[in-house]
């Protein structure tokens, strides 16, 4: 059973924690990220994760999408999936 985690803010620390979970193979197996709280749309979060100036490019695939057709902006972050 995976532990459900929410990340409050996707700044430097939030992205580092997320990257560590992915790099250690925990994401999807032992840890499930159910929410990322931030004020910017998911496409901005995807860009920040993919092109990090201090950590380098993210090794996996990163994208975003809308959870429903009536949403104005992307609100779902997709990583390696």
Image (spheres, rainbow, N blue to C red):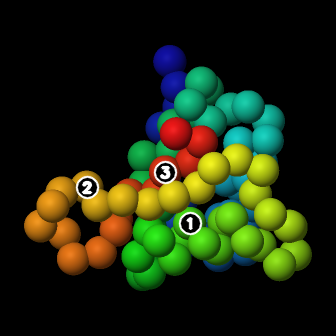
Distance, label 3 to label 2, CA atoms, is 11 Å
Distance, label 3 to label 1, CA atoms, is 8 Å
The dot on residue 67 is 2
Q: Position of residue 49 (x, y in %)?
A: 66, 66
Q: Are marks 3 and 1 in contact (CB under 8 Å)?
A: yes
- Neighbours of disc 1 within 10 Å: few (<14), some (14-19), many (20+): some
- Residue shown at 86% from the left, 67% from the top: 55
Q: Are marks 2 and 1 in contact (CB under 8 Å)?
A: no
Residue furthest left as drawn: 70
- Residue shown at 83% from the left, 78% from the top: 53
27 lies left or right of 16: left
The dot on residue 46 is 1
Dot 3: what SS? Answer: strand
Dot 2: what SS? Answer: loop
Q: Nearer the viewer, residue 37 or 48?
A: 48
Picture quadrant where residue 48 is located: bottom right
Picture quadrant where residue 16 is located: bottom right
Q: Position of residue 13 (x, y in %)?
A: 72, 68
Position of residue 45 relative to residue 66, above or below, is: below
Q: Position of residue 25 (x, y in %)?
A: 73, 31
- Residue shown at 77% from the left, 72% from the top: 52
Residue labelled with disc 3: 78
Q: Nearer the viewer, residue 79 or 13?
A: 79
Q: N-terminal of the two: label 2 or label 1?
A: 1
57 lies left or right of 29: right
Position of residue 44 relative to residue 78, above or below, is: below
Q: N-terminal of the two: label 3 or label 1?
A: 1
Q: N-terminal of the two: label 3 or label 2?
A: 2
The dot on residue 1 is none
Distance, label 2 to label 1, CA atoms, is 15 Å
Q: Nearer the viewer, residue 54 or 61?
A: 61
Dot 1: what SS? Answer: helix
């Amino acid at each position: 059973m995976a532990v459900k985690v929410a990340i409050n803010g996707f700044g430097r620390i939030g992205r580092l924690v997320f990257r560590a979970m992915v790099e250690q193979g925990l994401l999807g197996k032992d840890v499930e990220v159910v929410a990322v709280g931030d004020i910017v749309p998911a496409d901005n979060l995807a860009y920040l994760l993919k092109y990090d100036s201090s950590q380098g490019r993210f090794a996996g695939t990163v994208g975003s999408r809308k959870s429903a057709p009536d949403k104005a902006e992307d609100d779902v972050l997709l990583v390696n999936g």
